[in-house]
Image (cartoon, rainbow, N blue to C red):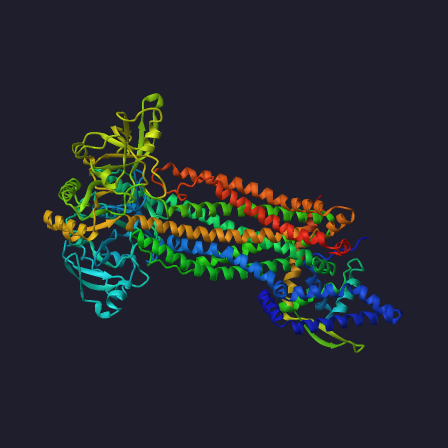
Amino acid sequence: MPRLQVLQGTLDLIVLRTLHTMGPQHAYTIATRLEQLSEDLLRLNQGTLYPALVRLEQQGSIKGSWGKTEKNREAKFYAITKAGQKLLEEETLRWRQMSGLVDKLLCES
Amino acid sequence: MRELRRAFAKLRNLFFPGRAEHDLAREVSAHLTLLQDDYQQRGMSAEEARLAARRAYGGVEQAKELHREERSFLWIEQAAQDFRHALRGLARTPSFALLAVIALALGIGVNAALFTTYNAVALKPLPVADPDRVVRMERWMASHNLGPNQYGFSYPEYLYTREHSRSFSNRPFSSMVAASWAIALPAGTGQMVSANYFADLGIQPLLGRGFLPDEDQTPGGSPVVVIAYQFWKRQFASDSRAIGQTIKLQGTAFTIIGVAPPEFTGTPESPSRVDFWAPLSMQAQLTPGQNWLSEPDQKHFQIFARLEPQADRRAAQAQTDLLIRQFATTYVELDKTTAVTLQRTSYFPNTDDIRFRALAAALMLIVGLVLFVACANVGNMLLARGAARRHEINTRLALGASRGRVMRQLLTESLLLSSLGGFAGLVCSMWATKLLGVTLQQTALLAGGDLTSIDWSPDGRVLVYVVVISLAAGVFFGLSPALRFTKPESTTRGQIAGSRLRNFLVASQVTVSVLLLAIAGLLARGLIRSQTAEPGFRTSDVFLVAADFGNFGTDPAKAIARETRLAERLRGRPEIASVGLGGLPFSGTWSMEMSAGQPPHRSQGRTLASYASDTYFDTLEISLLRGRGFTPQEAGGSQPLAIISESTAKRFFPAGNPLGQYVSLDMDYSGALTDFQVIGVVRDVRFANLTRVDPAHVYLPFGLARKHIFAGLLIRIRGDQQQAFQAVETTTDAFDRDLTPSLHLLNLDQTVIESQRAISRMFATLAAILAALALTLAGVGIYGVVSYLVSQRTREIGVRITMGATAWNVWTNVIVGGMRPVFFGLVLGLLLAGGLSTVLHQTLVFPGSTDFLYGVPFYDPLTFTTLICFVLGVAAVSSAVPARRAVRVDPMVALRYE
């Protein structure tokens, strides 16, 4: 089965949702979590996560701060902010509407 | 809000990229460490885990680049980078940079100079308030007469239009202003204006006040003037006490009530300096003996109007047209008005005249070609340079720079060059415009005009123009080299395409250079002739006796009779050899349709016409070739007789003897023909202007002159000039004391001929500058490109010589090869130049039009031969020099040459 490409614009939603459910995380866990969830269906170079992170951080939706992992490695932890929660709600709603519409269209025939 | 926040963050990163970059590096390395830890935990060795981590992560540099792109305005950062790179690149090759900038500065400079001039005279609006809503009325006449006459309206017309335009439900104008033509008085030149002139044009006097609303009401009742800033500075040394003082104009004392602001220089109908403005109620005092205020055919006023804010210009024009033509039915119009239009105001009134536009367009085209050659030169130099930089570009492409990125960098370089060129060009043009302004002013002074009030300084429009042409030039010469050098692989095909491009550039450059050289060469040669062109009649001791005979008065016939009687008196004086009445050379032309001959061989065409008395030909020493001149009775009578010029005889009577035959003239442009019997043929002269022999000229008896146009009293003196002047003055004094104050003598040599020569000299200077520019650019350009193309073939020449080719073989091969595009361009350029001269030739169908070539044939063999020799010579030398070097080189060295 071919791997899925990340749909344009959905990466932001995925990152926000991950941070919302799992609490502050660093880039590596976000990437790993993504792979696990999709059961390797969705695979991306971990480096490509960075543009989404910087975009969200500049918007003020997430906030990054340096900290230590349990193994005492240094890493930058990202946490969702209030503005981020709001964006997540908006985006989730939009996504639901969109996917509902596409579902309906596909079921019709 | 979110996006705004992001933009701020991006900006911060643009100016302080250090922190974000450091952060990113730290994060990436932390990420990799975590990945590696993970893999090691799954049992990989440290080295294996490190590699696996890298794989999982993807390209580190690409990820960083994506990050940079996301976090900052990358394009700005890159543009700055490209800019620095381009600066360094140019600094490394200063001679190239200097040459390119000079070429561009010349090209852009001439364009900017011309545009600045055009802007000053045609685009800048009059310095009135809200100039976009101010219009000038223009009249179109049945005679198709063009020029300042088109702005002549009578005062009754003004009153009628003003009154009736108010009655329209959608009132077109909020105000209308009348301003007379500039009248030259000994004390200064002035305009007579309606009292609302300053108030409604929105001009605040610098000192004092403008006119009061009722100051144009009572005839002779308001002897007040507003003076111009320059006049105030000159005559009153900028003293504020000038207000309240009086100046004497035509014998009446006028009180100075105000000084106009420096930027307002009046609204004359043709370029001249205005020193004062007086209310039009003072007309009888300022131009005595005439009645401009109540005669409907005394058209000496211009009408300006301010459009209502919501008024549509087209509708306003239709309404004005209707009103003026309605008014025309109330009196007999000498020259029927066919239409009235509203024109935007600019310094030169006639800028929408088709002839002015054609001249401007032609000049723009010529200087545009200069810029084209300059661009082609720089483009070629870039191509040559690019070949040397190929290695660098390929390396960059190989290291992963995208094609667009490299192209952007190359284009930045050409834009930098063109911007530098544009800046230098602008500086040059400011200087050139000043020079041009001075030359134009001198010419204008000789022609009776004055341009001192033109503001030559460049404004925003000029700046925009220079920026636009500079950038366009940069893209124009930079694009094709940039496209070519970034082609994915430099295959042989690419190289062939490249040499094709270069050949095309050489050919087009030669074409344009030939065209420029042909234009400049022909002009220059024609104008050299102008300095020696002889009018064909006596000028050095011939004088026009000018005085106010009442020329503009209500009864032209009376003025003519008065002039004729004075001529009789002068005739007997021993100091005066000959006295004639008739057409005044070089002072304007009167041309009309003429036909002659019997129906099957009837010839038709335009001819110049003028009046002549019995002694006119003797005064000007125009010799009679056949037949006879007018007898005194005929000259003073109204018999329909004519004397024609030699060329007229040849053209209209090709077969037979014109004497006794008839010529039919359309005297009043109505299509009704009047027949005149030919009684004599005289030698050809240059009457209309010094540039050409009149193609056709008919002299009619002076007695037929009804209007006093372009004619006057001419005398040829004998002996000492002072004594002759004395004689004229005493005779005039004895004849009519009223004439003496306005009496003056004008010498044709000193006035008209000198001014025509001066105009020609100015054109010659311009043509010479153009020719010098064309020669430099063409020479440098052709040399640079051709010699480069040949030097590229050094290696090939080495091979040929190794294979046994003789030096002669190589010579012919290389030179002929190098010359092929030159030949091609030469032929094309000559064809274009020929076409252009044919078009120019068409303008000569009007007998009065100026021949800038002064009779040099449009296919002047001397100009064209010199031109061909020059272009071929430059091309030959430029291919011979590198070819010689190549032939002399040791073949082994040549083979390694790259």
Determine if residue B468 is in view: no
| Viewer-closest of B772 and B509 | B772
Is B322 or B490 nearer to us in this picture?
B490
Residue B862 as seen in the image, left or right of residue B164: right
Residue B675: x and y in percent read: 25, 27
Q: Residue furthest front?
A: B719
Q: Residue at x 55, y 45 (%)?
A: B869
Image coordinates of residue B644 in percent, x first then y, are 28, 32
Q: Give the x, y percent position of residue B678.
A: 26, 28
In front of the other: B101 or B580: B580
Q: Position of residue B738 (x, y in %)?
A: 12, 50
Q: Is residue B803 visible?
A: yes
Figure quadrant of the N terminus of chain B: bottom right
Residue farthest top in this picture: B600
Query: In this rendering, would B14 be left or right of B171?
Result: right
Which quadrant holds residue B255? bottom left
Quadrant containing the C terminus of chain B is bottom right
Q: Where B535 sits versus B654, above or below? A: below
Left or right position of B678 against B757: left
- Numbered-mark total: 0
